[in-house]
Amino acid sequence: MQPQVSALELRAKTGGAAIRKIPIARVELDAREFAAVRKVLESGRLRAGRVTQAFENEFARAAGARHAVAVNSGTSALFLAYRALLEPGDEVIVPDFTFAATAAMVVAAGCKPVFADVDPETCTLDPHEVERRLTRRTRAIAPVHLFGGPADVAALAGLAKRHGLRVVWDAAQAHGAEFGGRDVGSFPDAVCYSFYPTKNMTAGEGGMLTTSDAKLARKLRLLSSHGEASRYSHILLGYNFRLTDIAAAIGRVQLRKLPAALRRRRENARILTRGVAGLHGITTPRAGSGANHAYCLYTIVLEPKALGMNRDQFQRALLRHGVETAVHYPLPLHRQPIFRGYGSDRDFPVSTRLAECVVSLPVHPGLTRPDLERIVQAVREIVSTRK
Ligand SMILES: Cc1ncc(COP(=O)(O)O)c(C=O)c1O
């Protein structure tokens, strides 16, 4: 829920003049996307075809993977990865602090999600907690590069190897994030991306899987399109999760813009951190060792006692300065109605606390220098006047 602030309150801040609201996210489209979509529309070939294939090739190259399979959402990408790699009843260890789809698709694939707590600094899957949740039925782990900050790839990949587990990486928020100098899309077994409009790049809606395993890529491709090996010959029970060439046309342009957009996101994050780090009651985001954060989201952790206000009050105060914020995420997975019975607050102290205290500030590439200064000033003012 977004806190509400009236237009009157907003005007009061500036002595009557309306202040421009700084949005939490903004889709950046220009004539290049419009022209690419127009070309597809004029061609009359709208379904997955040559444009989607070109998008897959370009995405695989950018992510440092041998193969990429385009699908119609990040959720579909996760579902297909689990379907392709696992058998019904298998257990998959998932972080307790993530977007619901990471775990919901485990259930949809007939498997069982097992939640594990996250690291308090990076908010990503804690390898020690994974070790504690292993059972004889554990077959995979699904770490999430949350907010664009890479999980501890070295520790998690090592753990998976030692225990013979598959790894499905959720990189829905992490286009362009790196670990150990490598793009997160290059690690085995499968990496799942989303092109939802608030992500680092968009296609309207859409998703992508990357893998360097040719057999797995073929299976994913089959599953995404009716399991159809040749015309009307269905060799696997499949689905229609295909992307359209219309969406792929947007995606291709966005992929070309990604390096510049990432530079802006990282620079914006640097300015925000320089401006608010060290303020009592606020912890700024941190990439783990060896990780290069992609800042899909700039999520700070509040300490309500030190601040003298709760998260709601903090968000409302920022909105009075015209700064929109959001909460990713207000509930840990074990508290979601769909996951009742999967554990209690006592099992996941870190994710339970994070869900109460995180708040995301705008970091998108559309921010101007004055916008960033306004965000920093607003946070500093709110923190100092409360103490
Ligand atoms: C971490 C995470 N996983 C999965 C998804 C699902 O992606 P989509 O919305 O494209 O289905 C999202 C998107 O919001 C996400 O943030």
Image (cartoon, rainbow, N blue to C red):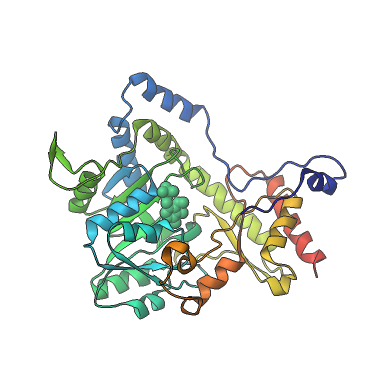
Residue nearer the viewer, 369 or 115: 115
- Answer whether residue 48 is visible to the viewer in this image: yes
Furthest residue toward right: 15
Q: Residue at x 36, y 80 (%)?
A: 132
Answer left or right for 143 relative to 1: left
Image quadrant where one finds the C terminus: bottom right
The answer to which quarter of the image holds residue 376 is bottom right
Q: Residue at x 33, y 38 (%)?
A: 243
Residue nearer the viewer, 147 or 71: 71
Image quadrant where one finds the N terminus: bottom right
- Relative vertical location of residue 103 with respect to residue 249 in this rendering, above or below: below
The answer to which quarter of the image holds residue 342 is bottom left
Residue 150: x %, y % from top left: 44, 62
- Relative vertical location of residue 200 with respect to residue 376 in this rendering, above or below: above
Answer left or right for 127 relative to 230: right
Answer left or right for 228 relative to 291: left
Answer left or right for 7 relative to 141: right
Residue 288: x %, y % from top left: 48, 68
Residue nearer the viewer, 259 or 23: 23
Residue 352: x %, y % from top left: 53, 72
Residue 261: x %, y % from top left: 52, 44
- Answer whether residue 182 is visible to the viewer in this image: no
Count of residue discs: 0
